[in-house]
Amino acid sequence: MLRLEDICLNLGHFQLRDIRLHVEAGTYLALLGSTGTGKTVLLETIAGMHTPRSGRIYIRGQDATRLAPEKRRLGIVYQDSALFPHLTVFSNIAFGLRLKGCPGGEIKKAVEDMAAFLEIEPLLKRRPNRLSGGERQRVALARALVIKPYVLLLDEPLSALDRALRRRVQNELKRIHEELGVTIIHITHDVAEAFLLSDRLAVMKGGRILQEGAPDEVCNRPASRSVAELTGIENLIEARVENGRLATSMGYADFWPLAAEAGDLPARVYLTLPGWSIELFPAGKPKEYIWRGTLTVRDVRPGNGTGIVELTLGHEGGELLRTHLSRREAQALSASLNRGTSVPVGLLAQGAHWVPHETPR
């Protein structure tokens, strides 16, 4: 449906560099990255608002690199919905169809059908200033979808909504994708949102796409420290390869569970460990762990329905590891998790991965 081949773009002091991305029809792709990394610039380049210095954009197999935005048949929804304040909801939704010169009867039916699909029929005569934030975003979605776009482009569409509204619109996006089968590219900096909605994930930093794949694959097998950090991996342990083992500040860890993917292991690496792979009071078989030992509880604090436990070697400059407990687990272990208490800990082989050592930028 969409193919980007070696896209390079200069925009002031910012650059998109060597962007390659293939999006199959019907895919929900989340483009994840922090603010200022070039996600919106890339989306607008796909939409035709910027012309790349080099590279090619293909839409449904056709070269669209120099095609005018209105001829690309792409729908776009921004964070602020960007509705026309002087037009009614009906006229906002109908705008793209009128630009295409569709007959009035066809426009009326298409708008009413889309309003029914998104359950906004009662809003059709209102103006945007009489809508809630969630209602405005649903109208913006209707305006983008009514033209039956090849690709729906979403630029942080939920970031201005409160939690309840965000969850409702997230559910709406899942329904749109499942029932209409439209191809979606969704920009976000929210890792949880990316994993909830997408079936493909591309991680972006500094004008480049660092890694792309299935969300679980990218999270469990990050290609670099930057990808690990951007996908929410909380624990990165510096290690050196010594005599077939990994030397860390906590002592030696086995990397035999990583051998199948190791290849030529660099001399210095980071072990990446999601919070769930750090087990307190480990009770499994020894081969289930790459390291077992004793760490000190540095802090226990509440999270969103969980308890966050910080662990350290107990001396200045030692590793700081984080894991999460359910509220029930935290209550059951409360007597054993006082600050300064030593607790047995195991690092599960199942969650362990290594990435090359790199200096964070």
Image (spheres, rainbow, N blue to C red):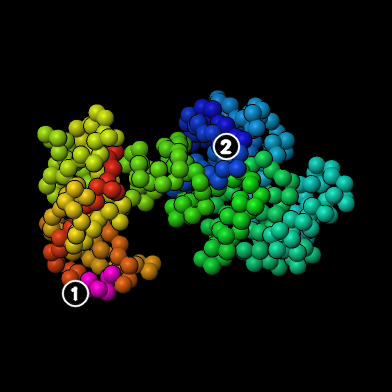
Which residue occupies the extreme top position in the image?
54
Q: Earlier in the sequence, mark 2 or mark 1?
A: 2
- The residue beneath circle 2 is 24
Q: In what element is the residue under mark 2? A: loop
- Label 2 crowd bin: few (<14), some (14–19), many (20+), radius 10 Å: some
Judge left or right: residue 219 versus residue 200: left
Magenta region: 329-334
Q: In what element is the residue under mark 1? A: helix
Quadrant where the image shows the C terminus: top left
Task: Return the x and y of residue 257 as percentages of the image width and height.
Answer: 24, 41
- Label 1 crowd bin: few (<14), some (14–19), many (20+), radius 10 Å: few
Q: Is residue 332 magenta?
A: yes
Judge left or right: residue 290 versus residue 70: left
Q: Which mark is residue 335?
A: 1
Classified by dominant secondary structure, the portion drawn in magenta counts as: helix
Q: Residue at x 44, y 46 (%)?
A: 215
Task: Return the x and y of residue 308 as percentages of the image width and height.
Answer: 29, 64
Q: Which mark is residue 305?
A: none
Quadrant where the image shows the N terminus: top right
Question: Which picture quadrant has residue 244?
Answer: top left
Q: Amino acid at mark 1?
A: Ala
Q: Is residue 24 visible?
A: yes
Q: Residue at x 17, y 71 (%)?
A: 336
Q: Amino acid at mark 2?
A: Glu
Which residue occupies the extreme front position in the image?
285
User: Which residue is nearer to you in this view: 178 or 236?
Assistant: 178
